[in-house]
Image (cartoon, helix red, strand yellow):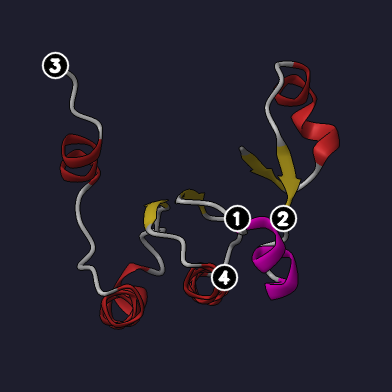
Amino acid sequence: MALVHNKNHARSLIDAGYETREIDFQKLATLNKALKNIDTLVYVASKTYSVFDRVRELEKVLSAMQENHVANLVAMSFISLEDSAEAMGYLHGLNDDFSHLTGHEPESMEHFLARNYQTN
């Protein structure tokens, strides 16, 4: 399942047989529709130039995950050097929110993959 902003840009995924759902991270209604029956979400933040817009986006994603009982989140993002000092305090609070909403502590990608996708 691929969640995409625009199905026209996902033509290669559709042609390869992947199911796609359109999503808008700024609209909770599209998030709730897209996350139905999803177990693990690999979330790549939208390209925004404001760290606070990105944080609001993540808050909506976490709310939709809670509403739809999405069990796992793999989040990938970045913070520009200009925003890092101010944003890190805010993001630390988001870790607490994430833990409260999901009952899980954030973990590294390496630990998540090792725990969930071990090969014999």
Marking on residue 110: none
Q: Which span is picked out in magenta?
A: 27-35
**Kind of residue at badge 3:** Asn
Marking on residue 57: 4
The percent coordinates of residue 77 (x first, y second) are 42, 52
> Do the residues bearing badges 4 and 2 touch, measured as CB atoms within 8 Å?
no
Judged by depth in the image, the label closer to the viewer, 2 or 3, is: 3
Image quarter hosting the C terminus: top left
The percent coordinates of residue 4 (x first, y second) are 70, 44
Q: Which residue is mark 1?
A: 46
Q: Secondary structure at mark 4?
A: helix
Judged by depth in the image, the label closer to the viewer, 4 or 3, is: 3
Vertical placement of residue 112 versus 26, above or below:
above
Q: Which residue is mark 3?
A: 120
The percent coordinates of residue 107 (x first, y second) are 20, 56
Spatial CA distance of label 2 from label 3 is: 36 Å
Q: Quadrant of residue 24 in the image?
A: bottom right
> Do the residues bearing badges 1 and 3 touch, measured as CB atoms within 8 Å?
no
> In this rendering, would 56 be left or right of 70?
right
**Kind of residue at badge 4:** Glu
Marking on residue 23: 2
Q: Residue at x 76, y 25 (%)?
A: 14
Mark 4 and mark 1 lie on one chain; the one further toward the N terminus is 1
**Kind of residue at badge 2:** Ile
Judged by depth in the image, the label closer to the viewer, 4 or 2, is: 2
Mark 2 and mark 1 lie on one chain; the one further toward the N terminus is 2
Spatial CA distance of label 4 from label 3 is: 38 Å
Q: Is residue 34 magenta?
A: yes
Q: Residues within 10 Å of mark 2 (few under 14, many from 20)?
A: many
Mark 4 and mark 2 lie on one chain; the one further toward the N terminus is 2
Mark 1 and mark 3 lie on one chain; the one further toward the N terminus is 1
Q: Secondary structure at mark 3?
A: loop
